[in-house]
Every structure is written in C-alpha cells, then in structure tokens.
Image: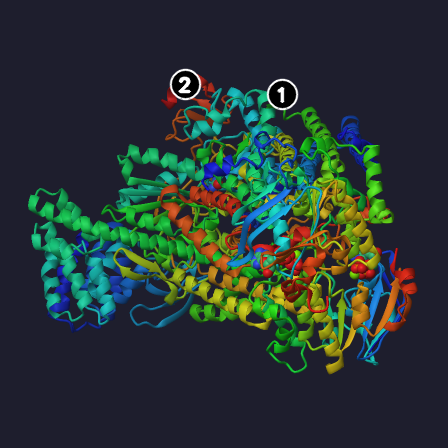
Amino acid sequence: MLKIDKLNQFYGESHTLWDLELDVPQGKCTCVMGRNGVGKTTLMKCVMGEETVKSGSIEFAGDVELTKKKVEDRSRLGIGYVPQGRQIFPLLTVEENLRVGLAVRKDGSKKIPERIYELFPVLKEMKNRRGGDLSGGQQQQLAIGRALVIEPRLLILDEPGEGIQPNIVTQIGEVIRRLIEEDGLTVLLVEQKLPFARKFADHFAIMDRGRRVAGGEIGELSDQLIKKHLTV
Amino acid sequence: MWLTRPLRERSTQLFLGVLFAALAVVTLLHLTMPEDSPFYVSSFTVTLMGKYLCYALLAVAVDLVWGYLGILSLGHGAFFALGGYAMGMYLMRQIGDRGTYGDPILPDFMVFLNWQELPWFWHGFDMAWFAFLMVILAPGLLALVFGFLAFRSRVTGVYLSIITQALTFALMLAFFRNEMGFGGNNGLTDFRDLLGFNLRTDATRLGLFIASGIALAIGYLICRGIVTSKLGRVSVACRDAEARARFLGYRVERVQLFVFVVSAMIAGVAGALYVPQVGIINPSEFSPIFSIEIVVWVALGGRATLYGAVIGAILVNYAKTVFTGVMPDAWLFLLGGLFVLVTVFLPRGIAGLLASRRKKQDEPTDTDSDTGKEATA
Amino acid sequence: MSLFEEFANRDRVFEFLTPVESPVDVRHGPILYLEDVNVSFDGFKAINNLNLTIDDGELRCIIGPNGAGKTTMMDIITGKTAPDTGSVWFGSRHNLLRMNEPEIASLGIGRKFQKPTVFEALTVFENLELAMATDKRIIPTLRAIMRPEYRERIDEVLETIGLKDLRDNLAGILSHGQKQWLEIGMLLMQKPRLLLVDEPVAGMTEQEMERTAELLTSLAGKQSVVVVEHDMGFVRSIARKVTVLHQGSVLAEGSMDQVSNDPEVIKVYLGEEA
Amino acid sequence: MSIIRSLTLLLFAIIMINPAFAQDQNTDSGRALLTNLAEAPASEVEDAIKSIVRSGDERARGWLEAYGANRLSRIKDTGQVVLVLNNRGRDWEIADPLTGENMGEMSRRELDRVAINNRIRGQLEGILAILDLNAADPDVREASARDLMGKVDAALVEPLQAQLETEENAAVRDRIQAALAIYRVGEGDLDAVDELSGSLHPRARAALSEAVRGDNPALAAKARQALAAIEQKLKLNSAAETLYFGLSMGSVLVLAAIGLAITFGVMGVINMAHGELIMLGAYTTWGMQQLLPGQPGLALILSIPAGFMVAATAGIIIERSVIQFLKGRPLETLLATFGISLILQQLVRTVISPQNRTVVTPEWMSGSLVINDALSLTLNRMYVLAFALIVFAGLMLIMRKTRLGLEVRAVTQNRNMARSMGIRATRVDILTFALGSGVAGLAGVALSQLTNVGPNLGQNYIIDSFMVVVFGGVGNLWGTLIAGLSLGTINQLLEPWAGAVLAKIIVLVFIILFIQKRPKGLFPQKGRAAEG
Amino acid sequence: AEDPIKVGILHSLSGTMAISETVLKDTVEMLIEKQNAEGGVLGRQLEAVVVDPASNWPLFAEKARELLAQEEVDVIFGNWTSVSRKSVLPVVEELNGLLFYPVQYEGEESSENVFYTGAAPNQQAIPAVNYLMNNIGVERWVLAGTDYVYPRTTNKILETYLMDMGVAKEDIMINYTPFGHSDWQNIVSDIKSFGSAGKKTAVVSTINGDANVPFYRELGNQGISASDIPVVAFSVGEQELSGIDTGPLVGHLAAWNYFMSVDSDANYDFIDQWIAHTGDEEAVTNDPMEAHYIGFNMYIEAVKKAGTTDVDAVKDAIIGVTVPNLTGGYAAMMPNHHITKPVLIGEIQDNGQFSVVWETPSTVAGDAWSDYLPGSRDMIADWRKPMFCGTFNTATGKCGASAGEMAAESN
Ligand SMILES: Nc1ncnc2c1ncn2[C@@H]1O[C@H](COP(=O)(O)OP(=O)(O)OP(=O)(O)O)[C@@H](O)[C@H]1O
Ligand SMILES: Nc1ncnc2c1ncn2[C@@H]1O[C@H](COP(=O)(O)OP(=O)(O)OP(=O)(O)O)[C@@H](O)[C@H]1O
Ligand SMILES: NC(N)=O
Ligand SMILES: [Mg+2]
Ligand SMILES: [Mg+2]
C-alpha cells in the first residue's frame, strides 16, 4: 500500500530522516516504534505532506507518487491521519469537527456515518460541545473519529492511545482490527506501548536516529531488539 | 550589574560604537567644514538627524514591549506625546513676556481665548527640574494606571492592542479640545529657549542632537539590560506561555507592568527631546495612525532585536524625508511598496537580514505563532 | 463586584497587601484537602461533590475515565479554575481558593500539564533556569545572576531528564516526548512541596516509563506527588494508594489491587481484560 | 410677509372664482414681464413678481420656479431673458422661456444671471405653496397646508374655510383645521386649544406657549394643560429619535466593521487596508453614477454587486500578492497591509483626484419618513440600517450554514490539519479574503450615501472598525453586530449632554474599562477551547 | 542666463489636507508657467520647488526649513491650516523667508515674513453676519464649528459682536465637533429644535473640510431647507461642493472673497487657464486659489519694483502694491501684511456653484487684530518703518503689549 524509499528529510540544517525505507503492506497494521525524537512523527508528517522531503519517494497504492501530490489531495486518495497531539479544531463543535472530513468522501455523503458514533458514543453525547472543551482522551477519540469519516484506505495513527482510558484503548485496538479485517483497511501505527503493539499490529519497524533499524512480522519483535533499540 | 552586562556583548558594543561614531562625525563635520564644502553637515541636517534619533528611541521603547513582552502597543504615541507636552509646557513658560500679547504668565493661546489664569496643571512647569521630572512621570503614571488595570484583568493580545489604541485616540480627542488648556489643535509652538539656550541657534541644535544620541544610547542600554537579564527571559516566557509562567510563580502582570512603565518612560523622554527640535507639539502625535507607524518601523527593522527598531525608525523616516522632497506626488507608493516588499521578502525585517548574514541566532525571535494566536482564535 | 472592591481586591497587584507567605502547616494532617468541590461548565457538571485528601509525602495515583474531571481538579488546585462551591486547603493554613496562580506556585505547588507546555522561544537551559526556585519578584529577577551552584543544579536536572545534548537548543524544536521530559525537569527545578503530574508518560517508551517511575517514587516522602495517568502498567509500578474519579467524584479509593478488582471500576474504566 | 398677504387674496380670487382662467397667449406681454423682473432693482423685485402672478399667464409658474432655481439669465448682448437648462461647465444650454424652444449652448461669459436671494426665494415658495393647496395630488396639498401652519392671518381664514368645505382628503383637512386652530388660539378661542392639544407641530406649541403667557387666564390654564400633555408626548418621541440615531450610527459601525470581522476576526489578518477596501466600494458607486448619468437610483442598486466585486477582486489581488506569503505571521500582515493602504490611498489621489467625489442620493433615499410632526426618520439612514442587517444576516448564513463557513473556521484554527483533511486551504483563503473584502466594498456603497467619497474615507473608519470587532469579541459575528449597535447607541445617548467630542471620549474610555471586565470582548470565546 | 527664481510650494499632497491643498500647489505651478511664458521676471525664469509636508504639522516646519536652508528658495507659497502656519512661522522668521498664506484664518497674527492673502475675520465673518441680520432678519444664531483655533476664535469674535448688536445670550447656540465628524444626527436635530422657537434662525458654520458632506446631507434629510434655517459657511467653497450632491442644499450660503461664478473677464480667463492647465473640463476654482493668484502677482510686482529678489527689499517694496483681483477690482497689500478684499455672500446652486447675492460696496482691508477680542482690541500691525511692528499697542504706544494693560483689559 505504501512504499517509502530512501527518504531524507531536514529541519533547517538538521538531518532528521536518513535514507529511510518502509513498506506498509495492504490490509495489515504496521507499527513504527522508536525512542522519543527519533523521527516517527516526522515520518508521518512526510507521508501527509506537512513536512517537505529532501529526496526519496513515497509510493501509495502501487502507482501514486505521494511526494508530488499536494497535501489536500493526499486525503482524497484515501489517507486518514490522526496526528500526535490530537490537533482537533478547538472552536468547532464535535459534530463540525467530524463534518470537516465529509467533503473528501467519494460518495459525497453529507451525513456523518452513524458508525463513528457507534464506535465512540461519547462523541454523540457531546456533539454540540466545542472540541477544545473536551477532555484529553475525548479529544483523542474525536481525532480518530474524524479520520474515519473520510473512510480511508490507509489510516495513519500517531500514538493513538495516548491519554486514553484503558478500556477505550482496547476498544480502539479492536476497532482498528475490525476495520482491517472487514474493510481491508491498511494501518500505519506509531506506538510506544509494547503490549498494544504486540496485540494489534501485524508488522513492526523500529526507527533510530532517523533510520529504520529493524522490522518484520510482529512475532519477530524480540526482547533483544527491544533492548537494543527501544531502551536508552 | 544588569545595566552594564550588555556592554560585554558584541552587538551592544557594535551598536554603541556606530552610534557614537556617527555623533562624533556629524558634530565634527558640522563644526569644522566650511559651508560650501560637500562634507558640510548643515544645522538643518543635524536637527533632522536629531529627530530620527528621537524616533529611534521611541521605536526601541516599543520594541521592548512588543518584541520581548508580546504586547503590541498601538498607543505608544501617547507616551511620546505626553513627554513632548511636558517639555512643550516648559518651553511655553520659558517664553515669558516675549509672547505676542506680552503676558508674563499666560501663553498666547490662553490670552486670546480669554483665559483669566493659568490652569492648575500648568503650575510648576516654569521650573526645569519639575518639567523634566514630568517628562518621565506623566507617561510613567499613565502607563502605570492603564497597565495596572489591563494586566490585572489579563487583557492580552489584540484586546490589549486595541485598548492602547483607544487610549491614545481618547487622549487625542481630549487634547484637541481647546477647553483642555493645551492649545487645542494648534498645540504648543513658538518656543524660544531651553535651559537658557536659544533654540534658534545652531549650537543649541547641535546640543539637542547630541543629547538625543546619548538618550538613545542610554535607552538602548536600559532595554538591552532588561532583555538580557533573567527578567528578560521571564518576559519572553510570559509572552509565549503566560499560564506556564504563572504556574512557576511569576507574577506575570507585574512583569508586564514593570516593562510597560519603563517603556512608556523611555517614550516620554524621546518625546521631550523631539519637541524642541521640531518646534511644535500638537495632538496629532496622539493619533492612532502615528502609533501604528511606530510599530511599522519596528517590524520593518526587525522585531525583538532593539537595534532593528533603531534601523527601522531611521530608515523609514529618512526615506520619508527624501521621498517627500524628491517625488512629492509619488512617495507614498514608494513607502507603501517598501513596507510590502520588506514584509514579504524579509520575514525578520532588516535586522533579520543582517542576522542571517552572520548565521548566528543569538536572539529569541520566534514569537508570532503564539502572539498571533490571539488574532486567529 | 463593586468598583471599590475591585480596586481593593487584596491578592492582586499591590505588593504590600499580599499576604505574608508562611510555610505550609502540615502538623494537623494532610497537605492537600479538597472538600465538597463542585464545578460546572455551562451547566455540565465536571466536578461533583469531590472530596480528596493527600497526606504529606504521599504518592497518590489518580485514574479515571476520560472526562472524569482529573485535569479540572488540578486546575482548581492550582488556581486556574475557580470552583462554584467547596473548599481547597493547602496544609491547614492556606486557603487556595483565595489565591492566584503565582501565589499558589510560590507556596510550593508545581504542575505538569497534560499537554506539555514549555517556553518554546527559550532554550532548554533557560527553561530550567526560569523554573528554579528563587526570588521571583521583579527587581531581584532583573538583578539575578547565574551563580555556579545554580548552573550545577540545572546540569544535574538536565542529566536526569536526558536533555543534556539539547541544552542550548530552543525548546520549540523538541519532540513531544522531549517536551514531556523538559516539563518534568522544570518541575524538579521548582522543588515544590506538592507535585501535580498530569499524564507524564504519554508518548514515552517502556524504558522511559520506568525511569519516570523511579524518579517519581524517589521524590515521594520528601515531596508529595499526585499523578494522573492512564497507563495501568505505569500506575501499577508506582502506586501505593489509588483514587478513581468518575463523573466528577470519587468512585473508589484504595490499593491498586483493591481498585482494579472493583467491578464498577472495571466497568467504567479498565475494561474486562485489564 | 407683506407680499404673501397681499398675494393670497388675489391668488384665491383667481383660483376660486375662475379656475379655468383664460390666458392671453400674447408672447410680448410675457417677454415684458420677464424683462421687468430681470431689470428690477432689489426693492422692486416684489412688484415684478406680483405682476407676473397677476398676469395669470399659464407659464408663470414655470418662470417663477426657474427663477427660484437660479435658472433665469439674460443674454448680455441682446438683453433677452432665457431659461438655463444646463448650467454646468463653461457653456450653458439655454431655451426661450416664452416658447420653450431650445436655443443651444452659449458661453457663460455671454450670460447674466437674473439675481435672486433667499428672502425672495422664501416668498416665492410661499406663493407656490398656496398655489399647491389646489393641486391634484393630496400629498402636495397636505404639504402646502402644513406650510401654512402658523402663517394664517385674517385674510386667509375665509379661503381656507372654503377649502375645508370642499377638501375630501382627511389628512389635508386636519392640517387646515390645525392651521386655523392656531390662528384661533391667537384670537383667544378656548375650543381651539382642544383642537391643538394633541398636536406635536412646533407652530402649535408656539401658539399654545404664547397663550400661556397671554393675559387670558382661562385660556392660559387650558393651554398649560394642553402643553403639558404635548411635552409628555414629545419626550417619548425624542427618546425614540435618539434610539433611532443610535441604531443608525451603530449600523454604520457594523457595516464598516463586518468585513473586518471576517478578514481580521476569522482569518486573523490585521488588515489595515480594510478602510481602503471600503473606499473602493464607495468609489464604485461614484463610478456607476458616472456611467449612468441621471439614474442615480439604478446606479446605486447596481453598485451593490459591483462594489462587492470590485472590492473582492482587490481583496483577491492583495491576498495572492501579499497575504499568502505571511501565513503564520499574522502580525506582519499589519505591516504589509499598512503599506497597501498607503498605496491605495495615493492611487486614488493620483488616478481619480485628491478631491472628494459627488455621489448623488436617489430621490427615494432622500428626505425623511414622517412618523409625526415631532418624529421623522431620515430615509438614507433607514436604508443603511436595513442594508446592514441584511448584509449581516447573509454573512451569518454563509459562515454558519455553508461548507465554506466550516472550512474557513477549520483552516484558521489549524491550517495543517485542515489541509490533511482535504480542505483546499489556499482556495478557502482566497474566498474568505474576497468575501471579507467584498463586504467592505458593500459598506463603501452604503457609506457613499452618508459621507464623503474621497481618498481619506478609509482612514476615517479603520480605527472604529477594529474597535468594534475587538469590543464584540474577535471571531464572533454576533459580537460585531451587538458591539456596533451598542457603541452607536451609547454615543448618541451621550451626545446631547456631553457634546460630540466628549461623547466620543467617554465611549473610548468605556471601551477601555469594559475590556477590563471582559478581557475577551463582549462575547468571548469561553472555556478551554479558547485557550487552545 | 541668471539663476532662476526659486518658488517653494509647501502644500500637503497626501494625508487629510491633500483634499484642499493639492489644487493650490497646481495653481502656483500654473501661475509660474504663465509667468515664465511671459518671460519671467527681471529676465529670470521662475522654478517651482515642490515638497510634500503630508498633512503633518512638524513636517511642515521641517520642510519649510528644507526649502529655505537647503533649497534656498526666494519665496514660499503654502499652508492651509492655521496649525501648519503656526508651525512654520518660527522657521520663516528665523531664516528670514517670505511666506504667502492663502487661506481665511482667525487673525491675531502679523509676521514680518508672512503675507496673509486669505481673509481675516473682518473680511468674512463679520460681513456675513451683518448680511444675515440685516437682509434675512436672523435673530437666533447657531455657531457651529470644528473644534480648532480658527472656528474658536471666529466664534469668539462673532459672539462678542452679536452681543454688542443686542442679541441675547440664549439666542446663541455654540457647538463644536471634532475633525472629520461624520454623525450629525443629534446636532442637526438640536439645530432644528433651536430653530423652531419662532424667531428666524441661521447657522454660522466654521465646520472644516470633510465634516461638511455628512453635515449637509443630514441637513437635507432632516428637511432643513435654506429658507427655514439658512447655513452660512466660511470653509465651504467650490472645491468642497464638488464632493457634495448640492441638489438639497440650494440656497444655503457661503461668505468668501471670490466665487468661481463671479462675472468678470479676469475670472473667466483664469478659469479657462485653469481648465487648460488641469485638462479637466469640470475643474473648479475657489477662493484660496484666487488668494494665491493675488499673492503671486503681488510678489512679482514687488520683485519688479525692488529690482531684486532680496527678501528685505521685497518686503519693503510689496507694501502698497496693488494688483487686480479676479472679481473685477483691485487688491492692495496693506502695511499689516493683509490685503484688501471685497466680501461676497453666495448662495449654493444646484450646479455646485455659488450665486452672489450680496457684496460689500467696496473692498475691506484685512484686520490682523480683531476689534472684538479683549486682548487685541488696541493692537495694530504696521510693517513700514519706522513703526515696523506686528503688535503695536495703540493704548501704550509701544510695540508689544505689556502685562499691566493685559490684566486691565481682560477684566
Ligand atoms: N519543527 C522542527 N524543527 C526542528 N527540529 C524538529 C522540529 N520538529 C521536530 N524536530 C526534531 O526532530 C526530531 C524528530 O522529531 P519527531 O517529532 O519526529 O520525534 P518522534 O519520534 O515522533 O518522538 P516522540 O516519540 O517524542 O513523539 C527530534 O529530535 C526533534 O527535536
Ligand atoms: N471549559 C469547559 N467547557 C465545557 N466543558 C468542559 C470544560 N472544561 C472541561 N469540560 C468537561 O469537563 C469534563 C472533565 O474534563 P477533564 O479535562 O477534567 O477530564 P479528565 O479527567 O482530565 O480527562 P482525560 O483523562 O481525558 O484527560 C469533560 O467532560 C470535559 O468535556
Ligand atoms: N485657517 C484655517 N481655516 O484653518
Ligand atoms: Mg512523535
Ligand atoms: Mg485530563
């Protein structure tokens, strides 16, 4: 679904991503792991186009070269994004936050899919409250719900469990699995929490200092790898 | 000490060096060159430069609150004008019975509008020490009261900007009123002498020019001292994350008040030096557009650098002087175009251009994202 | 409030009118005491008759569903939000409801926000410098100089939070996790009597979590710590006493085991398999 | 007054006795009359007019009207009196007043105006008013009768009473009755006081006051009562009037500010060129009226879309050429747009003129809607008030109910995220800025009906506009509406006792103090959401 | 050839005053062109030096200094507002320049270096009030003005004058508004009720510039016509009218010393020249333009008479110089540096012009010091030697009033 090749990115002078390669297979959940500041979020932003890349390619769905697409068009291709730090629209109501994504939908529907509310009942309950007033965890749910509104083919989740109560984290994991299995959704997940990753991801990739240093089936994620790359 | 610390900085040394060199060169050329020499600096030019220096000092005051405290004051002209009026009142009283109507006490405008006696607030201005004290106290007091109210209520962002604008606008209207006793629209003019020196002599002009330069140096040092002190960092902290600063135990409103009052006083001094050089103080110095212009000088020079403010003020006003003479019909196109081009092509103003040359970022300049939030929220 | 009262409002700007700061009095029991606190936002009851007591030197974990009111509770303690009713005492001498944020902070209550909040235009070092427990009045701040012992202390903290290499970088470019650490570092610099820590390990790796856990446990005893966190692994690793908030009031309180076996807590918060 | 008195009887004689007066078509007598008028020294003009009226010539009214309007001139060479049809410029179009035949253009140097002054014009108007009492249009008759209030004298009583008999229109009858009652009160008639007791007409009041002061105690007592009742009513009316003044001033503020509420309030661009966008709208109105001479009303209506388009286009150019490069640097927009505002001002000075331009008020917008004798609402302001409300409602609809509104708000709150959600932020920026600018243009169209259309127009409104937007709470359209209306009203309430200057100062101080109470404006964004 | 004679033009071309002042710059340029076409003066050409003081008062002083000290101009034509003149005054006195000031003003000034070619209050305000009183029968007065020194002084003079003429205090209403005042609803409504007391009422307007359009609009809309309550304005000329729809204003008045509609050949020629110069068939002329016309011609005459452009010589020579004005008469420079002018009252017509309804039988000499202000009643100005004084006190016989008399005077 997504094939990243020799990606290099700079923040001003500082080289953040180094010849990064990553393969996200269709219909699977791939989990990117790594310590703080290794560039996970940066990578996601590159995929979404929020950061410009210096060189390399990002190929989507086999034929689309993402680096040549405008940011706005990437979501139209079917990429949903749940950024780190939620990034909801604070002054829009919950419902309006969700409605923002409607325009991108292929079917042109003007209604928020009922399914979102089923997944996150709290959003229905608070649909007239402004996004910014929600608690942290509620905002996270809103962010996921918002990404799902566009019915994406690829869903990018940057630490989706952050700040969410345990039972809902589990529930989110289950939702992701269900979407993968029922709708054939592809998921690119950034996650630090091993139990979660182990439970819901199919593949993993570990990053260190802007490079991909390990990867494979989730089963192959050994304690040794963890010790080597995820501890300080 | 906080005041002398900046003297150890390279940028301050450079700034003061350039400033004093300029003062010295101008003085020398003015005094030694024959009038027909191409190097002669006429007293007209000396006074003009004195005016620029006053504007530069004013810009530094604005940059202190805007650049480092995030308070976009659209009313700093008010403090400048108050300082100017305090000086103007002193100069008026110095005229004594040499006025048109020869009244030893009442200024001319009061005589011919039939005032019988000097209003109470004019008393004391015949004494230089009192007047000079008021040059600092009047703007300082206004800033104190105004800032006390505003900062205590946590008025921030554009809300603060607009009430500073309302303040100067209200003062402008008030000073326009002839009943106020400040000469209405005509303001105060026809000054004769200052501390016994005849204002119409070249020597006095030169003296005022040098005084303005020294005031600028001192003002710059004070601001720089504040900025490089821990208080300066606290200011930046208050600017960017007010709530965080509070939770660390800083009384944000007091920091703001302190810096704001200091800035107002500096503006007052700038106004006081400006008035004898241009020969008039009138309510148009209170006009909101003038205050906006000051901000424009600072932005053009480069915000949160102090020396950028100086460059901006001098450059814009020099451009004005030249353009209004050379192309009186089209100078606004040039000036307006300059503002647009600098904004688009020099995001950090002229100082930013200089800084990027030096490839060294020793100034905390990134700021807009947060202060701007007010505007976008 | 009348104009007069407004001007006479004691605990605002007049220096000479501010109450003399006195040490926290914990001889008679708890360091923090909330009683019958209520807050509502446009009719929505975020805090509902909340009662809570934190003992001196205690490390307390607070958990509870999203929107239970945990962050709001911290807002109340630190003076950011004024409750509709109730009382909040720091020791037995200080009524927190009569104070503003800086006063509360200088009493010795430090806070880490849920969303990491640092001074982005200042360097990491400067962030810590400002947080340091010193005289925070205007003139002393203006005249403050960087003493060698301060520098040492900051370096120490930089070491602890692992940002030594980034000490002269602007805080604005830190990654999410790095900001979390910086904020914890600022809290350490402040040396507060009571630390309120809102979701410290969000975005941290397992190993960093361990370090944080160690850090917080080591603080307990000397200082009192209140931790809000959703990561049960983390909570388990540090928890002594756990309070569960739900819909603005205490649902359960006790040891981690007691709480995690409470059916009600499982239902609203932990989920079946936790 | 003397001429009126002496003429009235005569006029009524003509009108009553022989309405279909057979006119002498002899052109020579007309010429003599006009020449007589033109040559009369100031003291004899009265007589000259009298003789024209007395002649009963059918064309007399036209001549007198032309005379009143300064349209009678003499050709210097021949002494012929001519009618000036067009008196603009150096060459004037003239016609023969006797035959109506167009005589082409003639240099102004060749012509000598037949002098008239205000006093004579007043007398002429009086004469024409009496003639109007017989007009076919009841409104004209009513106006004429109203003019006669307080001017009735013994000579007029009888003809008026006769008129009363035949008059069918009730309003006109009331007026005539009132006019007669004023006369009768003066004569000591007690019943007449009753007739005047409800009247708000100043003349009626003057007559009653006279009676109170007079030496007839019964009359004085009665008149005092009547006056008290009238005063009561007047208070109400004057309260209503002040409220109207306030709302109307407020609506101007709202109109001026509402575009800024979009460009600044919603988009965060500190748009110092807002005033100049208003100015462009006003100049569009002027341009339209130049394109459609003689049709000011149509031109004005067409200016609404045109003004919007012109300002919106200017907005798009500004956005594309400058603002788009300042994303995330809202404060710098102040600098750039300040530059733009200087350029636009000077551009108008250079390209059009440094002077103000004339924008004509169409007939249907001039004058007042008369509620009663003490209360009339000026029409131009009423239209502006209505226009402001319509523009506001339209904007509200766009921002609340359309996709654009949602997208605008999403983009301004979090640009990157909005783009990640597929919103074409650039397009939204352009559209929003165009919308805000266009609305500023609409404000200009409206303002052209109230104030100067000149290069300084924008400067006069920019400060107030920011004040209103901020006072109302940035980003809140309702806030802008309420803020504008309330500031306008407060100002007008204060003005009568504080004077215009002090009222303005008080309003500014009020804003400063109010912001202390509500540091985020009238309708602040509350709660966490606002803190971001 | 010799160096050209440099003529400084000090009028705002930008900012709020550009509205009024730009035409004056054009006028002087036109006059210079014409003079040059006629061979200049003393065999020298004239050269205009234009600067833009941008409606900024301190800048006026600075630019005046630039003109005199840097450009070394021989004469300056400039200023509109009194405040700009006050700002420039010390500069021209210090550098001994010549300034021709073309606008009606409040008086109370006579400088050795300034020539006042606009009207003093006795050449405009007083005759206008006389006209209203005697010809229209006005008994109640509204003095409405913009709050600055010219209206203030003028109204002070008029108030004294009216009271001297027996008008009761309650029959005078005085009202001041800020510059650019645009909301006149309340004030017009007040005027309306003030005028409905039965006595004939008139408004004497010293309302300045931009504030006039909304003022007249409001008058029209509230139905106040010239025959009810006439308004006589001292600051509204053809230039201002060209921005107003004059339809509803027909019959309102203005007092000036020149109107574009004046029927004289000199005037028609001037208009033709002006239209040719601007290339605008609709271009209008006004009173300050005429003042510059007179001032310019006086300067030329004086230079011819003195045979040099030396400032002191010209100053000496110009007193007594007489040149034709545009209304068919002559203007003479008086020893007090004011000139003689006819006073005309005009009524607004629907074509944006005034029609003259009254004029003084002969010209009136400008009075620097008003007879109706206590402080200046005894003062005169005479710049001929040996008196050579702008503030000569006839009571004390000294140049410059002294404190003792002032105190006695004001009681
Ligand atoms: N705007 C920026 N400018 C400069 N450097 C940046 C910027 N944003 C991030 N960085 C740096 O780039 C590196 C990678 O940051 P990134 O946010 O991608 O980390 P991450 O892997 O997502 O970390 P975390 O787990 O803490 O979220 C960090 O060292 C950070 O300091
Ligand atoms: N200003 C406000 N306006 C409206 N509702 C608010 C406001 N502030 C908080 N709330 C609501 O109050 C409730 C409590 O919020 P709070 O942030 O305290 O929850 P929390 O326990 O910290 O949740 P989380 O674990 O998700 O951070 C939430 O439902 C939230 O939506
Ligand atoms: N002199 C004037 N009209 O200001
Ligand atoms: Mg990250
Ligand atoms: Mg929370």
Quadrant assignment for ligand 4? bottom right
The chain under label 1 reads: B
Measured along the vertical axis of the image, is residue D157 above or below residue D425? above
Residue D341 in the image, given as x and y percentages of width and height: 61, 55
Residue in the picture at 62% in, 33% down = B268
| Quarter occupied by the C terminus of chain D | bottom right
Instruction: Please give left or right for residue E134 compared with residue B137 in the image.
Output: left
Seen at 78% across and 74% down, the residue is A187
Is residue D328 shown left or right of residue A41?
Answer: left
Looking at the picture, how far across and down is residue D5, in whole percent?
Answer: 15, 55
> For residue B195, which numbered disc appears in the image?
1
Name the element at disc 1.
loop
Residue A188 image-quadrant placement: bottom right
Q: Is mark 1 within 8 Å of ligand 3?
A: no
Q: Is residue E76 at all visible to an observer of this figure?
A: no
Which residue is labeled 2 in the image? E405
Whether residue B235 appears in this view of the structure is yes
- Label 2, secondary structure: give it: helix
Q: In this view, does D411 lie above or below D346?
A: below
Closer to us: E384 or B53: B53
The residue closer to the viewer here, E145 or D351, is E145
When the figure is inspected, residue D230 is found, relative to residue D51, above or below; the finding is: above
Q: Type of residue at label 1? A: Leu
**What is the x, y in percent for residue D528?**
60, 55
Asked whether disc 1 touches disc 2, contact meaning CB atoms under 8 Å apart, the reply is no
**In-image side of D327 versus D440 (left or right):** right
Q: Which amino acid does label 2 sit on?
A: Glu
